[in-house]
Image: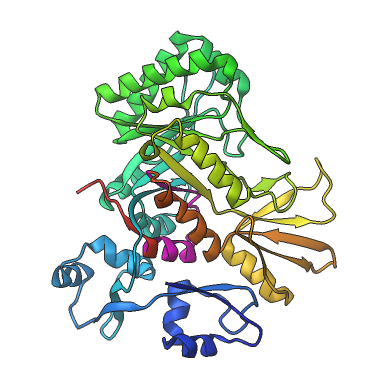
Amino acid sequence: MVIHVVQPGETIKSIAELYQLPEDRIILENAILNPDNLVVGQTIVIVYPLITHTVQEGDTLADIANQYQVPLMQLLRNNPYLSDREYIYPGETIVISYETDKIATKSTGGYVYSFVSRDILRKTLPFLTFLTVFDYFVNANGEISDVDDQDIVDMAKAYRVFPMMLISTLSQHGVGSREADLFILEHPEIQDIMIDNVLANIRAKGYYGLNQYFQYLSPDTKTQTENFIIKMSNRLKSEGLRYTVTITPQVNIERTDITYETIDYSVISQYVDAILFLSFDWGYSFAPSASAIPLSILETVIRNFTEVVPPEKFALGLSVIGYDWALPYVPGYTVANAITFDAAIQIAADSGVDIQFNVATASPYYFYNNIEGALHNVWFKDARSIDQISRLVPKYGLQGLFIWNNMYFFTQMWLVINNLYDIVKLLN
């Protein structure tokens, strides 16, 4: 795998000639939307097919998988565009395998809302070990919201993906209830009601486990939190269910030091299958531009956590949401809008600006003027970002990589991950 950064004067034709690959193959594998107007600084992932199959009359994907003795999921990962199609056609080229130097066998996870496009979900599932449905809300009485997600659970299992429900006090807009969290922690009888409701939903829908998000971890509630986790774990484990917790550690970065909230994650790790370290991003942000944590700081955080939590119990979260800020930035007033990778590239192409790259945060960025002439600043993630962050997982022996979120299909991300990891599938 080569991550090519477009240089001035390059075209898709010159890049194809450089790597001796067909233009249409590069466009297809990267899902490039601007092949006739590439942006300087845009990344293009170059991969070389090792074994390919030319579709014959009457071929099916299952037949091709059997012929080459490979899992059907491998064909869907190597040719994700096929997930959009009902048929394959004679003369088409199917990639059986790529020339890769995979660095690890790791699990991957994805978060979705129940209103995710089923076409996007179908395209994503071959790349996942776990799928977590995010929008289960619990109130201070221990009652949980009703979510229309049965077909998601069924689809996950059909693609050998482990379905998980996530429970939290968060709304779909990322607003949590500290009062509800504290009330539940302080009232064991409410915890019992909540656990009963969770288990009833798991049984009814056919989930295989629970992912619980703790937004407000505090030294003041340390004992109550640990006791709640132990209680939840005992109930879930008695029914053979997987139990993970997602946390967003409060990291304070000073000029000379890094501090964390004083939570003993070593105790929590004894009762869960994984602790997922993830900072959720939403459809908007009030934070200043370039707010991503530098990779050196992220590595320091990982090292500190793996000193108290076994690395195999620790999973790294990756948010792939980009943001577009109107400048000047005014704290508490300026709202950045979320954008996808494809949107970020298209804005740069339409505006005729070059993409820069911040090495410290492994993040591409650029400035542009909108149609009214207002200055904007865009930060997002590209193949370089995904590559560098994904490599931290095997480097520190972590359990896997979890993606927030999977409401759109980020082709370039999955192309990189598919060439770095053998993705674990737990279901037969």
Query: Where is residue 312 shown, x and y percent of the image?
Result: 36, 39
Which residue appears at 37% of the width and 43% of the height? Answer: 399
Q: Nearer the viewer, residue 190 or 413?
A: 413
- The quadrant in which residue 125 appears is bottom left
- Location of residue 17 with respect to 61 vertically, above or below: below
Which residue appears at 69% of the width and 49% of the height? Answer: 291
Which residue appears at 56% of the width and 42% of the height? Answer: 300
Q: Nearer the viewer, residue 277 or 81?
A: 277
| Magenta residue span | 399-418
Is residue 262 something that shows in the picture?
A: yes
Which residue appears at 46% of the width and 65% of the height? Answer: 411
Query: Where is residue 387 shown, x and y percent of the image?
Result: 49, 61
**Residue 46 is covered by the magenta coloring:** no
Q: Give the colour scheme of this rendering.
A: rainbow
- The quadrant in which residue 71 appears is bottom left
**Residue 412 is covered by the magenta coloring:** yes
